[in-house]
Image (cartoon, grey):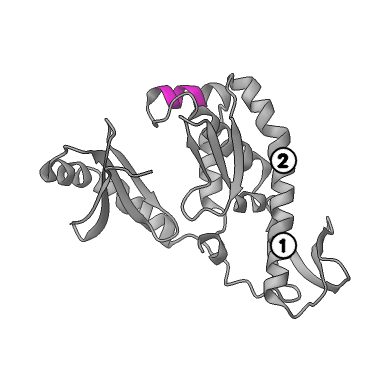
Amino acid sequence: MPTNNKSDEKIVSGIKVKVLKKDIKNFHLNVLPPNGLVRVSVPMDTSDDTIHFFIASRLTWIKKKIDTFKNHSRESKREYVENESHYFLGKRYLLKLLESPENYVEIDRKKYLKIHVRDTADIKLKEKTLQKFYREELRKILDKAVPQYEKLIGVKAEKYTIRKMKTKWGSCNSEDKRVNFNLDLAKKPIKSINYVIVHELVHLIERNHNKKFLYLMDKYLPKWREERQRLNKLILSCEDWK
């Protein structure tokens, strides 16, 4: 469906900023992982001077966020070899490879994440098998938790899906009542997953991050700021941002 959105780039104090002019009423500023891309969305009729002033007035916050991403711990590129580190629900496991007629993943609760595949030398097959496991396990968690939080908050998502997402843990289309969750949440603790669930469901009531949104977050998940901070500090993997 065509839109009237306009995109541009500006340099403010040496920082490149992607500017999106959209059919909105308020300004929205984001610093996005993994490299600290700065993006600002503004109403269509906003002047260049106003945009520049808005960005310049928030330079301290922007630089702090960029530094956070630069210093964020990252895994090396996954090679799917024996004893390589992988994460599931916030816990670190060592990879174990086993030949098997069927492709599946088994968790040794003490130490190992075991990938059973027909060909242990096939990197794509091992990756695909693990991604399928993550998707199935995250779906189980969402199918249980989303209805619980829908009931608590008093909303109903028409549909929620799991996707690979480059810059967000979740997203919400408040008009269609569709919610998306990042597949990589399967690697994170349950409390972090619950935070993202509540965050996106609250957007069904309030689409912007304004005072009403913050009030609702405080109401339905009082310690959400702690969970957000913990989620943003967790190790990132190179594959998270393909």
Could you classify mark 1 by the number of other residues whose Cα lies within 10 Å: few (under 14), some (14-19), or many (20 or more)?
Answer: many
Q: Which residues are magenta?
A: 212-217
**Image point 54% across, 66% down: which residue?**
238
Kindly check if marks 2 and 1 are in contact, taking CB atoms under 8 A apart as contact.
no
Say which mark, if any, is on residue 130: 1
Residue 205, placed above or below residue 103: above
Disc 2: which residue: 141
Secondary element under disc 1, as helix, strand or loop, is helix
Among the two numbered marks 2 and 1 on one chain, the one whose residue lies closer to the N terminus: 1
Question: Hey, which quadrant is residue 179 in on the image?
Answer: top right
Instruction: Give the numbered dot on residue 172.
Output: none
Q: Residue at 55% x, 42% y: name it.
A: 180
Give the residue furthest to the bottom.
Answer: 121
Residue in front for this viewpoint, 140 or 187:
140
Type of residue at label 1? Answer: Leu
Q: Residues within 10 Å of mark 2 (few under 14, many from 20)?
A: some
The N terminus - image quarter = top left
Spot occupied by residue 149 in the image (x, y as percentages of width and height): 64, 27
**How far apart, in angstroms, are the residues tagged by discs 2 and 1?**
17 Å
